[in-house]
Image (cartoon, rainbow, N blue to C red):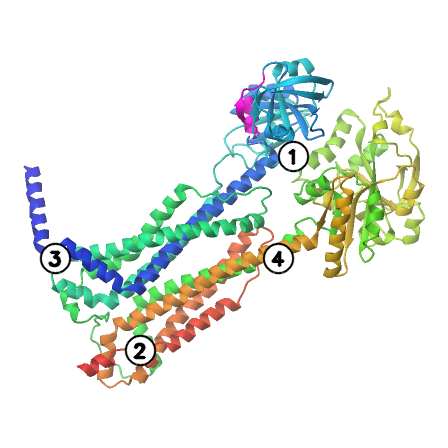
């Protein structure tokens, strides 16, 4: 029964709807097409809003996700693994104990067995590893073809190995190879049973050997353990505590990989969400304003449609067809522009994000789907209310339309008429429309000010200072300079002494410093070891400074703890460096004072502090014994006698020096480790002392400072030519502030052009938005203006009132928008600068003020005497 009634109700409802439809659907389609083409300004501005919305959505998603993926990959490449955690130099017994404890979802090991040589490649970059196939895939060496080695004479090689071999190797090919493990050397033919991917950011060519080979050799340089667990479950401290539970005296370094996993971090998702919400809100407000303006201007036409029998549903269908047509036009244009701008902006964005290596701009189909859905939401929100208003418009409005509200009749207030008072009264009466216009304009002003401030806050000088450059030109070994550039200090690499003679021919106008160093092992025992423990282990201030560098903390503090627990001598490294007095005269002095005569006498040395606070084992006035004999490294012997001492080093000649001062080094420490901490004891001796040594110190760095930019440019070109000749002898390279500065200037110009261009587009949107609201307001109130002129108000006075209304509206919009834009800029820049330190808050006050003044001037120029504000209609009547 209920179903029968429901069917009858549906039939009656459809009959009623069909009876209302006096105009056919085909006629509605033709009317929709004609009305669409008749309102070109509305179509253009609405399409522009949809283009802007979809473009910003594509840009936000693609660039931010590409940067996030590139940063994660860059960090993974630095760690060399996708595993969530790792233990460096672990023992196999500890690994088994950790595996049995069940802390991790999976844990495996990689054994570094040694290096190899082939006819086409040799060196430290050629690495022999042993692990299983799954663990290799964690470390970017997933198997591409073939299988994992099983027999003793089988190996799996990575793509770097194939490239070194000429790129023509395939599975099953034999290769003649010299395997140098920690204990043995094997010259034999190995069969390639598999080819795996390579770590593109790591300069290593890897081969993986079988378990049978590992059991035969039974040696290795280091064992690394990699563990998998849910991202965020454990910290570095947790991993270390797991190991300490196994062995309380374990000194292995444990680290959590911050870039593990494939999910975007919450901060990036929040940034994307904020940008998308802002884009949707702004575009929605723009489309709402555009359609409201169109509704006011064309309400007579829609009233006439009602007179000929067009229903409210059909009017809604007409508006929906218009909106959908604009949507279909604007969406592909916005998506294409988003991709184009993304490709253009990606290099600049990746550079400013500090990404090393490859950074690909990735656009996924889901991004276009998001842009399509969200842009549709923008259009739906923007046209919904104007569409409902037009659908409910009665046919009587074919005679005109006014947005004047009915007001309650009250007591007549006898106030003196002034244009300003009348304008303010009109604004209060039309508060809803005024608030809408002011709010939409404030949002655009906010976007303009924020964009300008962000672009202006990119500090190229701060970015240049982060490049670890301490001179205008630096010359050194290629690997050493690369380590400085990526912030990974390593061992000092010597360069040929012959380069000095070549450089002196071309650097007469430069302030040039040649950095020499001798390194020799240092063994501390007895009172010296106790003094070390007091200076390092018992120095809370020093240990606090090392808190964020776990490796350095374990190296420096761990030695002292091991000595106190086991009595083992402390083995570390002494570094002697040689400078002219004028080259060290500006060093920061923590203790003592600098005296040129004493320094050049050869009886005094400078002790380099262990940190930037002046911590030191030796103090001004102390007497230290430094080596006076420096054999070659290959002659070193670390054999111990029955007392645990090192007879070889005890036999080397030493000389007593007096510590003249404790200083902070500005060259080697900061350039190698990126901070003020040293990993051993370092002393500075006069350069004249080198002539008395039987072994010439290693030249590891040449720094030059130019008096002016022109000299720098000339000398840099000469240095490049000089190194081209020297590179046949050694892999040398140089870095220059001039080169970096030119690159940064070009990049800054590109970013400024795009950023300021986007800001100008936003500013033009503000002007167009204001002009549209102005035109719509006049069109909406023509009846009101005709009435005012009919009762005697002069057009000149009415124009003055309208201009004042516009000016007040502009003030309501630009003042909050400008102030809020500056406040939001400060907050966002300070927040973003925590991860991008070269973003320095540098607000631009003038552009926002100029845009506000420009909008204010526009408000005073329109309407003008040529504007139709209803007087012609009055005369016609």
Residue 391 image point, x, y percent? 19, 59
Asked if the residue under mark 1 is in contact with the one under mark 4, i.e. CB atoms within 8 Å, the reply is no
Disc 4 versus disc 2: distance between alpha carbons? 48 Å
Q: Which residue is under mark 4?
A: 745
> Label for residue 203?
1
- Measuring from the top left, give residue 17's x and y in whole percent: 10, 52
Kind of element beneath mark 4:
helix
Which quarter of the rendered picture does the N terminus lie within? top left
Whole-number angstrom distance, CA of label 4 to CA of label 1: 30 Å
Q: Earlier in the sequence, mark 3 or mark 1?
A: 3
- Under circle 1, the secondary element is loop
Q: Residue at x 68, y 35 (%)?
A: 551
Whether pointer 3 and pointer 1 mark residues with C-beta atoms closer than 8 Å, the reply is no
Q: Earlier in the sequence, mark 2 or mark 3?
A: 3
Q: Residue at x 55, y 54 (%)?
A: 830
Earlier sequence position, callout 4 versus callout 2? 4
* Label 3 SS: loop
Membership of 144 in magenta stretch? yes
Image location of residue 513, percent across then percent down: 81, 50
- Residue at the disc numbered 3: 23
Counting residues from the start of the chain, the first of labels 2 and 1 encountered is 1
Q: Are marks 2 and 1 in contact (CB under 8 Å)?
A: no
Whether residues under marks 4 and 3 lie with C-beta atoms below 8 angstroms apart, the answer is: no
For marks 4 and 3, the one nearer the N-term is 3
For residue 31, say whether it is visible. yes
- Would you identify the image quadrant in which residue 186 lies? top right
Label 4 – label 3 distance at C-alpha: 65 Å
Vertical comparison of 516 with 781: above or below? above
Give how far apart the Cα atoms at labels 2 and 3 are: 37 Å
For residue 766: magenta? no
Front in this rendered view, residue 178 or 255: 178
In space, the residues marked 3 and 1 are separated at their CA atoms by 75 Å
């Amino acid at each position: 029964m209920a179903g029968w009634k429901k069917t009858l109700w549906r039939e009656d409802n459809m009959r009623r709807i069909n009876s209302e439809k006096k105009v056919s659907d085909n006629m509605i389609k033709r009317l929709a097409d004609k009305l669409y083409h008749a309102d070109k300004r509305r179509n253009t501005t609405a399409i522009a809003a949809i283009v802007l919305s979809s473009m910003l959505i594509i840009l936000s998603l693609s660039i931010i996700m590409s940067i996030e993926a590139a940063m994660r990959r860059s960090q993974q490449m630095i760690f060399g693994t996708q595993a969530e955690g790792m233990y460096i130099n672990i023992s196999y017994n500890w690994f088994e104990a950790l595996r049995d404890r069940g802390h991790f979802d999976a844990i495996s090991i990689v054994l570094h067995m040694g290096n190899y040589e082939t006819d086409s490649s040799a060196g430290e970059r050629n690495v022999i590893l042993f692990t299983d196939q799954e663990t290799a895939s964690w470390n970017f060496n997933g198997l591409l073809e073939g299988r994992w080695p099983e027999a003793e004479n089988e190996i799996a090689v990575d793509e770097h190995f194939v490239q070194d071999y000429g790129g023509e190797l395939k599975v099953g090919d034999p290769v003649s190879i010299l395997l140098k493990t920690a204990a043995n050397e094997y010259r034999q033919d190995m069969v390639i049973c598999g080819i795996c991917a390579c770590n593109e950011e790591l300069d290593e060519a890897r081969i993986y050997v079988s378990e049978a080979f590992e059991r035969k050799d039974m040696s290795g340089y280091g064992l690394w353990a990699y563990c998998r667990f849910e991202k965020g479950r454990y910290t570095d401290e947790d991993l270390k505590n797991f190991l300490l539970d196994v062995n309380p005296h374990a000194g292995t370094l444990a680290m959590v990989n911050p870039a593990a996993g494939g999910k975007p971090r919450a901060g990036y998702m929040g940034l994307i969400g904020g940008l998308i919400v802002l884009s949707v809100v702004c575009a929605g407000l723009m489309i709402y304003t555009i359609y409201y303006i169109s509704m006011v201007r064309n309400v007579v036409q829609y009233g006439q449609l009602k007179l000929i029998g067009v229903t409210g549903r059909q009017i809604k269908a007409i508006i929906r067809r218009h909106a959908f047509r604009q949507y279909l036009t604007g969406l592909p244009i916005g998506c294409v522009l988003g991709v184009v701008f993304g490709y253009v902006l990606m290099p600049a964005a990746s550079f400013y994000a500090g990404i090393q290596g490859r950074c690909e701009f990735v656009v996924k189909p889901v991004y276009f789907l998001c842009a399509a859905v969200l842009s549709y939401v923008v259009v739906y929100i923007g046209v919904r209310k104007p569409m409902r208003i037009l659908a409910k418009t009665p046919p009587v409005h074919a005679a005109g339309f006014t947005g004047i509200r009915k007001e309650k009749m009250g007591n007549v207030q006898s106030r003196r008429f002034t244009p300003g008072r009348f304008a303010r009264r009109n604004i209060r009466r039309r508060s809803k429309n005024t608030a809408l216009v002011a709010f939409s304009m404030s949002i655009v002003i906010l976007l303009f000010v924020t964009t300008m401030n962000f672009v202006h806050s990119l500090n190229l000088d701060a970015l240049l200072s982060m490049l670890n450059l301490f001179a205008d030109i630096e010359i050194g070994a290629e690997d050493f300079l690369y380590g400085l550039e990526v912030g990974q200090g390593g061992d000092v690499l010597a360069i040929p002494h012959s380069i000095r003679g070549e450089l002196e021919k071309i650097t007469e106008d430069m302030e040039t410093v040649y950095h020499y160093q001798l390194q020799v092992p240092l063994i501390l025992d007895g009172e010296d070891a106790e003094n070390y423990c007091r200076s390092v282990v018992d120095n809370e201030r020093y240990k606090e400074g090392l808190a964020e560098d776990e490796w350095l903390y374990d190296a420096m503090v761990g030695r002292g703890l091991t000595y106190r627990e086991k009595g083992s001598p402390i083995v570390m490294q002494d570094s002697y460096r040689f400078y002219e007095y004028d080259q060290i005269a500006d060093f920061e002095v923590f203790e003592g004072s600098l005296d040129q005569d004493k320094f050049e006498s050869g009886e005094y040395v400078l002790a380099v502090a262990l940190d930037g606070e002046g911590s030191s084992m030796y103090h001004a006035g102390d007497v230290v014994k430094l080596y006076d004999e420096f054999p070659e490294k290959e002659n070193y012997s670390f054999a111990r006698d029955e007392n645990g001492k090192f007879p070889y080093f005890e036999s080397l000649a030493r000389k007593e020096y007096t510590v003249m001062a404790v200083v902070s080094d500005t060259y080697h420490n900061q350039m190698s480790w990126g901070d003020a901490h040293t990993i051993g004891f370092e002393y500075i001796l006069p350069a004249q002392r080198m002539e008395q040594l039987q072994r010439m110190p290693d030249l590891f760095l040449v720094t030059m400072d130019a008096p002016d930019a022109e000299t720098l440019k000339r000398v840099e070109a000469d240095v490049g030519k000089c190194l081209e000749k020297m590179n046949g002898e050694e892999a040398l390279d140089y870095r220059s502030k001039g080169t970096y500065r030119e690159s940064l200037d070009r990049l800054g110009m590109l970013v400024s052009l795009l950023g300021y261009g986007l800001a100008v587009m936003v500013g033009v949107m503000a002007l167009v938005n204001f002009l549209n609201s102005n035109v719509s307001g006049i069109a909406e109130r023509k009846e009101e203006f005709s009435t005012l002129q009919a009762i005697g108000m002069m057009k000149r006075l009415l124009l003055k009132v309208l201009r004042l209304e516009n000016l007040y509206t502009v003030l309501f919009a630009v003042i909050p928008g400008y102030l809020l834009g500056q406040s939001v800029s400060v907050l966002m820049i300070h927040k973003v600068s925590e991860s991008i330190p070269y973003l320095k808050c540098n607000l631009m006050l003038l552009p926002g003020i100029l845009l506000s003044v420009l909008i204010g001037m526009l408000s005073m120029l329109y309407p003008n005497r040529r504007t139709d504000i209803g007087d012609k209609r009055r005369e016609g009547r």
